[in-house]
Structure formats: C-alpha cells, structure tokens
Image (cartoon, rainbow, N blue to C red):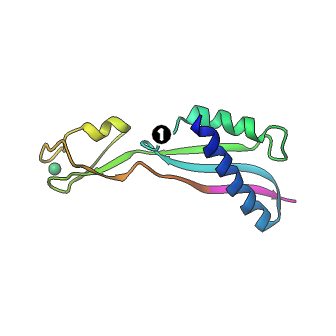
Amino acid sequence: MHEMSIVESLLAMVQAEMDSRGCGRLESVHVVYGAMAGIVPESLQMCFEIMTKDTPNEGARLELTCLPVRLRCGGCGTVFGGEGREALWQPCPVCGETFGHAVEQGRELYLKRLEAWPA
Ligand SMILES: [Zn+2]
C-alpha cells in the first residue's frame, strides 16, 4: 500500500519539524494533495491512525485538502479544470482539442501546516 510510505515520510517530516522547534505532542497535520496524485484519502487517514497509535502522537488529526485538476489546452492555451483524473480526457471548452493538455495543478502532495504542543 503506497499510502503507508506516504504517511511514513510525512511523519518523518513532521517529527523533524517538531524536534527543531522543541514540540512534544502533535495536535494536527494538514496535507494538500492533487486530484491526480493517486491519493485515497480514506486509506491515508487509516494509515495515519495506525502509524501514530501507541506513539506520543496518538490522537493527532490528519486534515486533507484536495486540489482539483487544472489543465492548459495544448491547442489554444485555455486553462480549464475538472474534479478528477478523468478531466484529462475532456475536450478543451474553447477549441475542442482533446490531446496534449498540460497539467497545471493536480499532482501536488505537500505538508501545509502542523500544530503541536510544546514539550
Ligand atoms: Zn483549446
């Protein structure tokens, strides 16, 4: 399950950040991901719960924000969007081009914010 390795590196990043600031217990983590990043939010939540269980960070919340897909038409340069991966196959609303759209947004995966308590 690749969510496991995502959560693993997320928690490593979080821990490094907390250590450098002298934080003790994690309150919440906010992660932003693109609709095309291949993230299944439910399994990310589940992995997060499993991997924080029996650690000082048990009970911390994982907040997820999904960024919709944004494409730039390869034909005329119009930027348009869609909810998920299937947006890739939709024709440009201006010129009708179906191929060669560049992905402007939708593949992101990053840690946006974390809240933690002082040690
Ligand atoms: Zn177009």
**Is ligand 1 closer than 8 angstroms to the Cβ of mark 1?**
no
Q: Is residue 80 left or right of residue 96?
A: right
Residue 14 found in image quarter: bottom right
Q: Which residue is mark 1?
A: 38
Residue 110 found in image quarter: bottom right
Q: Which residue appears farthest toward the right when viewing the image?
A: 119
Please tell me which residue is depicted at 15% across the width and 53% down the height of the picture.
75
Q: Is residue 4 left or right of residue 32?
A: right
Q: Which residue appears farthest toward the bottom when viewing the image?
A: 20
Tell me which amino acid carries mark 1: Gly
Give the x, y percent position of residue 36. 42, 42
Q: Which residue appears farthest toward the left when viewing the image?
A: 95
Q: Is residue 70 left or right of residue 98?
A: right
Residue 116 found in image quarter: bottom right
Q: Secondary structure at mark 1?
A: loop
Circle count: 1
Front residue of 43/93: it is: 43
Give the magenta part as a residue range.
Answer: 113-119
The chief SS type of the magenta part is strand
Please tell me which residue is depicted at 66% across the width and 33% down the height of the picture.
46
Residue 118 sits inside the magenta stretch: yes
Please tell me which residue is depicted at 65% across the width and 51% down the height of the picture.
9
- Mark 1: give few (<14), some (14-19) or many (20+) Cα within 10 Å: some
Residue 13 sits inside the magenta stretch: no
Please tell me which residue is depicted at 15% across the width and 44% down the height of the picture.
97
Give the x, y percent position of residue 107. 43, 49
**On the rendered image, what quadrant is the C terminus found in?**
bottom right
**On the rendered image, what quadrant is the N terminus found in?**
top right
Give the x, y percent position of residue 8. 68, 46
Give the x, y percent position of residue 108. 47, 52
